[in-house]
Image (cartoon, grey):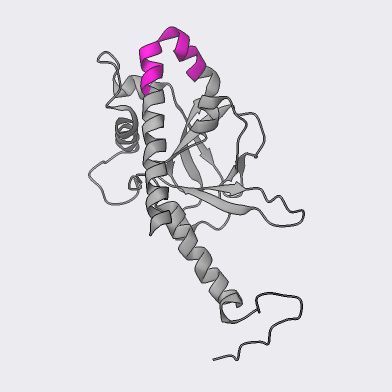
């Protein structure tokens, strides 16, 4: 085992064993694993599941989020119809922190990374969240008319050869139109998103107490 370096003058902590590069990479992977487990993750449609087709997977995702709140005369097919499908290549940026929110997305295949901008000049952005199949991202800014808090992108080096990210897109202007044309439907979407926020807050609280 490599000997620990002597403390560096002017530093309160020496660059010892746990500051070696391979330990830092291992800790980063552990942190990524925690971030990717926040919320209620759906299985990828490419995995062996009973969900079958891509449309069946997307309906299952929407049912999980909104099914308990949809009006009796609103079907999952109607819910699916307000979303558009989009495929984004690795390395692409969906939006940047501080930009006005214009849409939110639900990942159906692949991975998105949400990066927290650093307040220190020259310091790299920090990974704040990993969104995988079945996860919505961007909806909190859309509901509250806030700018995006994080920069969201498709990682260039995706694990398991995931490559491009496939997603459902809900435009903000379409949601706002629903508030006027079909308030019970729009309220069902809002309640579904609020419930997901409560799940995520509960999970974060549990992790913080462990």
Q: Please indicate, yes or no, whether residue 155 appears anywhere in the rendered image.
A: no
Residues 37 and 19: in front is: 19
Give the position of the C terminus as an image quadrant: bottom left
What residue is rendered at 36% in x and 29% in y? 192
The answer to whether 198 appears left or right of 19 in the picture is left
4 to 91, vertically: above or below: below
Residue reaching furthest to the top: 181
Residue 206 percent location from the top left of the image: 37, 52
Residue 176 percent location from the top left of the image: 51, 16
The picture quadrant where one finds residue 103 is: top right
107 to 189, vertically: above or below: below
Give the position of the N terminus as an image quadrant: bottom right
Q: Is residue 46 magenta?
A: no
The picture quadrant where one finds residue 151 is: top right
Residues 13 and 5: in front is: 13
108 to 68, vertically: above or below: below
The answer to whether 173 appears left or right of 160 in the picture is right
What residue is rendered at 38% in x and 37% in y? 198
Magenta-colored segment: predominant secondary structure? helix
Q: Please indicate, yes or no, whether residue 140 appears anywhere in the rendered image.
A: yes
The answer to whether 166 appears left or right of 141 in the picture is left
Q: Is residue 183 magenta?
A: yes
Instruction: Report the span colored magenta.
Output: 175-188
């Amino acid at each position: 085992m490599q000997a620990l370096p002597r403390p560096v003058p002017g530093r309160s902590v020496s660059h010892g064993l746990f500051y070696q590069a391979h330990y830092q990479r291992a800790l980063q992977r552990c942190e990524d694993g925690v971030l990717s487990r926040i919320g209620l993750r759906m299985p990828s449609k490419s995995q062996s599941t009973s969900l079958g087709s891509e449309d069946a997977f997307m309906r299952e995702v929407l049912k999980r989020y909104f099914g308990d709140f949809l009006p009796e005369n609103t079907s999952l097919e109607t819910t699916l119809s307000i979303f558009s499908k989009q495929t984004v290549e690795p390395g692409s940026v969906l939006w940047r922190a501080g930009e006005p929110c214009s849409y939110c997305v639900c990942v159906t295949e692949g991975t998105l990374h949400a990066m927290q901008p650093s307040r220190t000049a020259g310091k790299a952005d920090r990974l704040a969240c990993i969104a995988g199949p079945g996860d919505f991202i961007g909806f909190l800014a859309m509901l509250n008319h806030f700018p995006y808090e994080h920069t969201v992108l498709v990682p260039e080096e995706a694990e398991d050869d995931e490559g491009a990210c496939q997603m459902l897109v809900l435009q903000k202007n379409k949601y706002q139109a629903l508030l006027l044309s079909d308030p019970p439907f729009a309220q069902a979407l809002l309640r579904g998103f609020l419930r997901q926020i409560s799940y995520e807050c509960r999970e974060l609280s549990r992790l913080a107490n462990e």
